[in-house]
Image: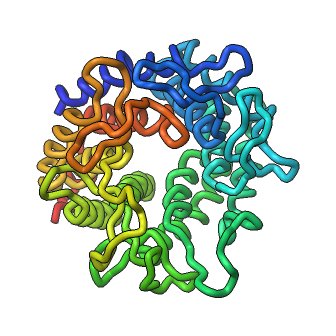
Amino acid sequence: MKQIAEQYKRELLDNVLPFWTAHSRDEENGGFFTCLDRQGKVFDTDKFMWLQGREVWMFSMLYDKVEPRREWKDMALLGAKFMEQHGRDAEGNWYFSTTREGRPLIQPYNIFSDCFAAMGFGALYKIEENPVYHTIAKDTFENILRRRNDPKGKYTKNVPGTRSLKNFALPMILCNLSLELEHILGSEKVNEFIPEVLGEVMDVFYHKETGLVLENVLADGSFSDSFEGRLLNPGHAIEAMWFIMDLALRLNDPALAQKACNIGLKMLEYGWDQQYGGIFYFMDLHNHPQQQLEWDQKLWWVHLETLVFLAKGWQLTGNEACRTWFDKVHTYTWEHFKDKEYPEWFGYLNRQGQPLLPLKGGKWKGCFHVPRALYQVWQTLEKKPSFHSQAVIV
């Protein structure tokens, strides 16, 4: 596995990161361009706050964890300055998008802009102890908690009281975000918070009858037999399980790590396309026709987050299924998503595994899932095994 770890390391440092440092900087207005074509040319200049925050986090984290390269810190500071100046409304909510110059375009309907702003400024504070960054991260996190039960607020399209659903994505992200911000929030607050988000992810959204993880449940946690209630997103569930394994490591809870590993493997087996390979984007719990027309596409982040999950599952539990699946998903991912001619990776494939779009970044794809996964797999495979040396393999 050392050779594979080196492969991920080299791809991160020699291919993917240079692409973003060379092409995403907006030297004139600050912040980052994310709409980049196959060769890195900017094809749209709108700026999306959640992607700005993600890129600030990425370069801050790399500066902190890998090497204190000045260019990485400069990238993080460039994005943070733009976000601080242009990213929020009067109530402190983060816009979804702005113009190149920073004029608001789309209202702060999407709480994930706030999640990644908090994550970005929290990571930046580790490498540049500016109290402003600490305050932004803390205030944003507290605002997320205030909004969490009604994240879209006045921007929601749903009629109140008819079919009130809650979504898996926010508690899933909070599992990771709480650890990312522990130096901001304090260990005591994180310790109080962890059981709540763990309960949401591992009990409320976990569908015991099938062993799968639902994307939406009714407000009381029960199943909704509707398009939204039957919706499965294998990538989301699998990504969440490596977040849970990180929490298990922090809590020294090998049973929790094993449970997360088992759930993630179940989702992967269910979501794998037996005909063409790769993992479906969306599925229906009862195999009914789906409302998402892109249900059978193969997306970059789904496969990369699965590789992180499998690496952590193998490292923490020693489950041989993780190693077998890692080899299978690794082969598919590197054969289909990695661009053999130009840097960075394709994001969107059709069911057969052919690129649908030549872009390397856009409204939804930025400097995040590819480099984070490369970093995580590299780091994980270089570590010595953890829990499974304590004889918890099942």
Outermost residue to the right: 90
Residue 346 lies left or right of residue 22; in this view the side is left
Total numbered circles? 0
Nearest the eye: 392 or 81: 81
The answer to whether one can see residue 120 in this image is yes
Nearest the eye: 124 or 114: 114
Q: To which quarter of the image does residue 118 belong? A: top right
Q: Up-down: is 323 above or below 264?
A: above
Residue drawn 19% across and 41% down? 332
- In what quadrant of the picture does the N terminus appear? top left
Q: Up-down: is 312 above or below 76?
A: below
Residue drawn 69% across and 81% down? 160
Residue 23 rendering spot, x and y as whole percentages: 52, 17
Residue 196 lies left or right of residue 392; in this view the side is right
Residue 183 rendering spot, x and y as whole percentages: 63, 43
Residue 161 rendering spot, x and y as whole percentages: 67, 86
Residue drawn 25% across and 61% down? 271
Residue 301 lies left or right of residue 130; in this view the side is left
Q: To which quarter of the image does residue 17 belong? A: top left
